[in-house]
Image (spheres, grey):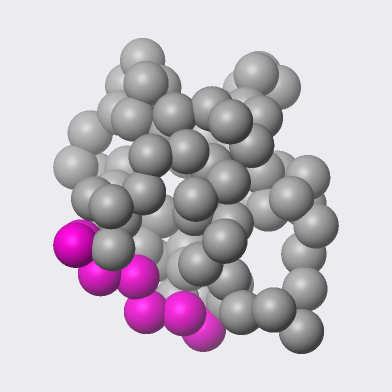
């Protein structure tokens, strides 16, 4: 299982975020360029990286990067 920092790195890469401002308490919807496309990218990342099906409803119920990380299966 990835650490929170590894997870944040994957989000940075998937969403092409070039700064290191992401922290577990960061609200991912506050990203300057947040859009429905970013939501789809996160859904795809969960599927390909973690074999986890992330639904739109589940994503809507998350607010922070930590909330997303908590959806990952624990090893």
Q: Is residue 52 magenta?
A: yes
Q: Quadrant of the N terminus?
A: bottom right
Q: Is residue 13 visible?
A: no
Please state if 35 lies on the left or on the right of 19 as rendered: left
Residue 57 coordinates in the image, percent (x, y): 19, 62
Q: Quadrant of the C terminus?
A: bottom right
Residue 65 coordinates in the image, percent (x, y): 53, 42
Q: Is residue 63 magenta?
A: no
Magenta segment, prevailing SS (helix, strand or loop): loop
Residue drawn 58% across and 31% down?
25
Q: Quadrant of residue 72?
A: bottom right
**On screen, 45 above or below 27?**
below
User: Depth check: 10 or 69 in front?
Assistant: 69
Q: How many marks?
A: 0
Residue drawn 64% across and 37% down?
24
**On screen, 44 above or below 12?**
below
Residue drawn 24% across and 44% down?
37
Residue 11 coordinates in the image, percent (x, y): 57, 45
User: Depth check: 4 or 17 in front?
Assistant: 4
Q: Is residue 59 visible?
A: yes
Q: Quadrant of residue 59?
A: bottom left
Residue drawn 49% across and 50% down?
67
Q: Which residues are magenta?
A: 51-57
Please state if 4 lies on the left or on the right of 16 as rendered: right
């Amino acid at each position: 299982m990835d650490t929170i920092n590894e997870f944040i790195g994957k989000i940075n890469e998937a969403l092409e975020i070039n700064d290191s401002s992401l922290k577990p308490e960061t609200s991912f919807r506050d990203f300057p360029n947040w859009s429905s496309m970013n939501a789809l990218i996160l859904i795809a990342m969960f599927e390909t990286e973690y074999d986890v099906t992330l639904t739109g409803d589940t994503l809507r119920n998350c607010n922070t990067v930590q909330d997303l990380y908590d959806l990952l299966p624990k090893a």
